[in-house]
Image: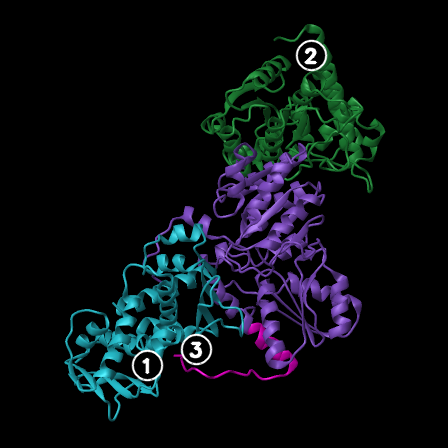
Chain colours: A purple, B cyan, C green
Amino acid sequence: MAADGLTYTIVDTANMSTAEIYGKVLCDLAEKHNDIVGLSADLAKSTKIGQFAAKFPNRFFNAGIAEQNMFGMAAGLAKSGLTPFVSTFAVFASLRAAEQVRTDICYPNLNVKIIATHAGTSFGQAGTTHHCTEDLAVMRSFANMVVIAPADGIETANAVIAAYEHKGPVYIRINRGFDPFLYEKTDYGFQIGKAVQLRDGTDITIIACGAAAYNAYHAAGILEKEDGLSVRVLNMHTIKPIDEEAIMKAVMETRRIVTFEDHNIYGGLGSAVAEVIVKSGKACAFESVGIPDEFAIIGLPEDLQNYYGFDQNKIIEKVRQIMGKDFEQTEDWEDEV
Amino acid sequence: MATQNELFASTIFLKAALPLTKVILEYRPKMAAKYKGLNGVVQFVAKDDAGDIGGYLQFTDGVLDVKYGIHEKPDIVFTFKDVKTMNAFFAGKPAVPSIKGLTKLKLLMKAVNLLLALKIIGRKTPPKKPEDKELMVRLMLYLLPLGISQLNKAGHPEISKFCQKSPDRTFAWSVTGTDIASYLRMKAGNSKAGRGKYTRSKPFVEFKFDSIDGALGILLQTTDMIEASINRILVIEGSPEYGKEIGSFMNMVGQLAS
Amino acid sequence: MPLSNEELQKFKEKACQIRKDTIDTVYWAGGGHVGGSLSFTEIMVILYYKYLRIDPKNPQWPDRDRVVVSKGHAGVGYAPILADKGYFPKELLKEYNHTGSILGMHLDGNKVPGVDASTGSLGHGLPISVGLALGARLQNKSWLTYCIMGDGECDEGSVWEAAMAAAHYKVTNLITIVDRNRMMIDGPTEEVMRLEPFADKWKAFGWIVKEVDGHDFNALADAIEYAQKEDKAPVVIIAHTIKGKCVDFMEDKYEWHYGGLDSEKVELAKACIDKHYCEM
């Protein structure tokens, strides 16, 4: 995939992932609150915590490629009264240092805020070693951990602020910083544990998080325009504690729920939603779409979203399928001259 | 016999660039007024063993239509000895056609004027007047998706391979603060270029230029791409890998047309 | 500075008492990591009775020195000291490991006053200690962090990650002591996973190493005072000890990493401990 005329280095990519604005928000927070410190495992440039590092060098600790120690240090820093924000790739945060997160941070309920980047298949080209389609399942199972999957850069910024204000550990999983903006402003009422209703609807409810939420929102627009379907879209940014009320409302009012996530179908958003539905004993058509318990193939993330069924087109197809409709096409392929 | 590349270049000129003459008349009302009531067909044709290649301007009561192919009874014919020469002519390089129908002077002059006006897209430096700058950017942003789509339809190996694999996706270009916008839709081998904002869904990749001058800087390659990104002269919304891919197709169109 | 005879005598008596309390606790608990709890008695006694700036009446005192017993399995040796210092009533030792007790095999920082980190899984204590020490420095606090580790524990990669970070960040308000009793569960450390040249490893990671006899109070005092003052690099005190020290049938036996004692063995053990102290 050659591209002429575009030479860049890793330093430049730090400037190009402009969709990730939480770095600035963290810096603003840190100006006001002296207890905020930052850590990364040699990934400060790839995650936006590099901005914090540049602005507050004496409050930032690079642990080098040593995640277990990093999370242990974060625990120690939190015990000494500070509020550490730790950032590395999701696969390393949730798996390499899983025990440290669970035992050193969740167990004593420490104020460590984890910003796990390159989650799901968002680092598609890097292959399975850098994918993380298990982190929601793992983090959900740690008591005391709050698990958030923001839909875009604006929501991430909100999540970072909310995480700071929350007492206890928080896990925020985001992508690479190239996500399109779902929201236009930050003041839409972000609250941990409260799903955001992006669209109201009565035929079916899509519950999604992360990149899938953006895709779902736009898919629903097309479904309304072309099929006349009334699709409710819930951005379930907080996987734990999950918004049971919003799910039950969707069950009662739309009776069809389909979930989309960049995660294994086992243990993530779909499972969490299913737990609520089944526990209620109410009838509801339910499907969950995600990585079908396999290790994702290599590919560009947008292609993987299509391949695994949670890009805009596939969401539309899936909803139509559930609603029993055929896929329609606009077939005018004449160029406009 | 014309080479693959020569044929692709001619596709750009005849099917993407030449039709832009209509846009010129649309946005230059004073110039268009002079074409009122004009009638006639001006044919451009390149001789080739595998079959002549050509396109023509058709004026009907002052309304211009641009078509690909050979007209039955053109009033004026610019004949080029081969595709290479015709390409050079459209690229503004020295190339002399033989011209039939020199007697229809008025039609000839009008056609030549239009071609001269079209040369604006081949400029290496920005024009001085604001309305010229705007026209140049508009024409270039219309040319790009059109060129890529036509190359796909002509079977350009890289572009058609990309299009073949593509799920239903749209790539868009726009200049903030103006009505200049265009798009390219692709799906499983099909492609469609269009003008204006694509409203059916959010584009998969959108190239947003912050201004006409900003766009000129990027399109004429006088502004460094990384700098442009940091200063947000050009913001590429959506997948960066696909942004690069489409960027390289844009370059291909530009290179073939020079 | 050498300890006065009075101090020395006091510590020896305290160590004798704590060892006996450890044996009792193992009995009440139905079993415990007795070997490693007896090897670090002198280390813990001199810390808790001379050097630590703590207040048992105020376990959360913000300016207290922090103690991270990274070898958290030595709970039966740690709990008696906390009880003796007054962090909780000594009677609670009788409920060690019982359902609902605050005391279990690994002391829980959420439940037991005086415990600064819930250890038990090896390799966690040093990273946490580095974090604590950095936190103190960042907030301009003068409290120190003491990390007590096992030697087998140093197989864990996270220990060396922390060691690298401590040297890199010049974490000198941290005092690390390794209880080098040369034994682990499956056998001697040098047979299971060779640690030697152990001191060289720490030096290679940028630490200053002090090797002492872990049962010699004066040597420990010297080393700790050195570590407290040293500000060029972090200091590790490798305390050479004997697993199961003072209980003849346990000494230097890796089998006694963990074990249970019936009342007969308890008496025998206590007699050994007394004998050793009379000899000293």
Residue A139 visible at all:
yes
Residue B113 horizontal/vertical position (percent): 26, 75
Residues behind callouts 1 and 3 on a single chain: yes
Q: Residues within 10 Å of mark 1 (few under 14, many from 20)?
A: many
In primary-sequence order, the first of circles 1 and 3 is: 1
Residue B239 horizontal/vertical position (percent): 47, 62
Badge 3 element:
loop
Q: CA distance from mark 1 to mark 3?
A: 41 Å
- Residue A330 part of the magenta-drawn span: yes
Q: Which residues are magenta?
A: A314-337
Q: Which mark is residue B188?
A: 3
**Horizontal relation, residue A234 to residue A41: left or right:** right
Q: Residue at x 54, y 32 (%)?
A: A58
Q: Which residue is mark 2?
A: C279
- Residue C47 part of the magenta-drawn span: no
Residue C280 horizontal/vertical position (percent): 68, 12
Camera-side residue: C28 or C102? C102
The quarter of the image holding the N terminus of chain C is top right
Q: Name above or below for residue A8 compared with residue C38.
A: below
Q: Which mark is residue B35?
A: 1
- When asked about the image quadrant of residue A260, the answer is bottom right
Residue type beneath disc 2:
Glu
